[in-house]
Image (cartoon, rainbow, N blue to C red):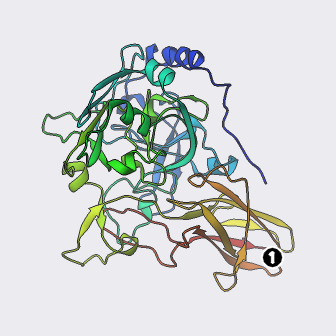
Amino acid sequence: MKQSTPNATPFSRRNFLTRAGALGLSGFLAITSRSVRASELIELPFANGRRELVSNFPQKGPMILQRSRPPLLETPFEVFDQGVFTPNESFYVRWHLPNIPTTIDPAEFRLKVRGGVRQPLSLTLQELVRDFPPFEIAAVNQCSGNSRGFFSPRVTGAQWDNGAMGNALWRGVRLKDVLDRAGVASGALQARFRGLDTGVLPQTPTLMKSLAIDHARDGEVMIAYEMNGKPLPLLNGFPIRLVVPGWYATYWVKMLADIEVLDKADDNYWMSKAYVIPDTPGANVTPDQKDVKMVPINRMVPRSFFTSLRDGAHVRRAQPLQLRGIAFGGDTGIAKVLVSTDAGHNWQAARLGTDHGKYGFRQWELPVRFVSTGPKTLLVKAINTAGLAQPDHPNWNASGFMRNVIEAVAVQVS
């Protein structure tokens, strides 16, 4: 089975700061609609799915343009067949506020830690890299609205295909170590995180996300300064971002600049109004359902995909075919991936590839041979180690969040 590993270089603090300095002091294109030119048009597989494939966002290769300001760039799905680690230049981009720094000087950058702590901190990038033990984890970063374009009835928001996700090997420091350096005061309830992006209008709510203090200090939540062995790309949060393994990307604050320890529940707009889901199994409701309790979105759910075949593919009868794809367990690892070549009547267990950690992609593979011609529906579903399986029917909610229905691909055998 084809595998890939990040293009990592031997880690050295001096080497990292040299590379980060060169990145931070270089000039970047202003991120405006004028800077975007289409190289070609593509059709995503849902209504109004025509998009531009663009190549001139900084540090990015060809990406599907969903919006230019703030930038929303989707990973072309064929990238996921190249291996389990999504290349930095192909990693999707999702910003909420339009004013994003286009240059950051690492020598001037500071991360502040304040609020309910015994010793407020103002950490340089050099101090983060030099003074804390390095920590590394493979984890999927997935937009809450990944696959929103498939929701029916249609909902508002970015109409993503399945490419608003990516898996990287993240390197940085444990958030716990930074909070312990500051000394979390008794009575602390949550840690709140803010980046450097801002709105155009002063009344725009500042983007802030919070985690329970025990979650923030669980030893897995981290402050990343590298992805796949290189400094973070600017559009993926340079110089540092929060990484919250197993949780949706709304918590993975980019260009992290401020951590505030709170002694009460955070009720800011981005926790109480935006990114909330029905408190129901699978965040599922009917379009006419009223008075549903809403809670902040949180843990991811399992997903799996075909990567070697797309809808409408033609295959040969009796010819050996190696089906291939990726899967992840959401907030835990993958137990198994099941594949059906007859629209769900029978299922076979796929062979799983290398396990790079419970929060990352796993490749799967299954050899098949079709004995009859005609249209065939192929299905794939993942079951995680907690026993949660992808559902037979898609969920629905007004925000278009948490889609994880069993994936299907239609092929023609001739």
Judged from this view, the residue extending furthest toward the bottom is 345
Residue 202 lies, in percent from the top left, at 14, 34
Residue 104 lies, in percent from the top left, at 39, 19
Front position in the image: 244 or 121: 121
Q: Quadrant of residue 138?
A: top right
Residue 368 lies, in percent from the top left, at 80, 71
Q: Is residue 75 above or below residue 196?
A: below
Q: Name the residue at 66% across, 69% down.
A: 336
Q: Is residue 45 above or below residue 81?
A: below
Q: Is residue 191 left or right of residue 353?
A: left
Query: Which residue is denoted by mark 1 in the rendering?
Result: 370
Residue 278 lies, in percent from the top left, at 29, 69
Q: Is residue 109 left or right of residue 336?
A: left
Q: Is residue 382 left or right of residue 283?
A: right
User: Disc 1 residue type?
Assistant: Phe
State the quadrant of the N terminus. bottom right
State the quadrant of the C terminus. bottom right
Judged from this view, the residue extending furthest toward the front is 186
Residue 338 visible to an observer of this rendering: yes
Q: Name the residue at 45% across, 74% down.
A: 394
Q: What count of labels does the image hold?
A: 1
Front position in the image: 147 or 383: 383
Q: Tag 1: Cα neighbours inside 10 Å, few (<14), some, or many (≥20)?
A: some
Q: Is residue 377 above or below residue 237?
A: below
Q: Name the residue at 45% across, 44% down.
A: 221
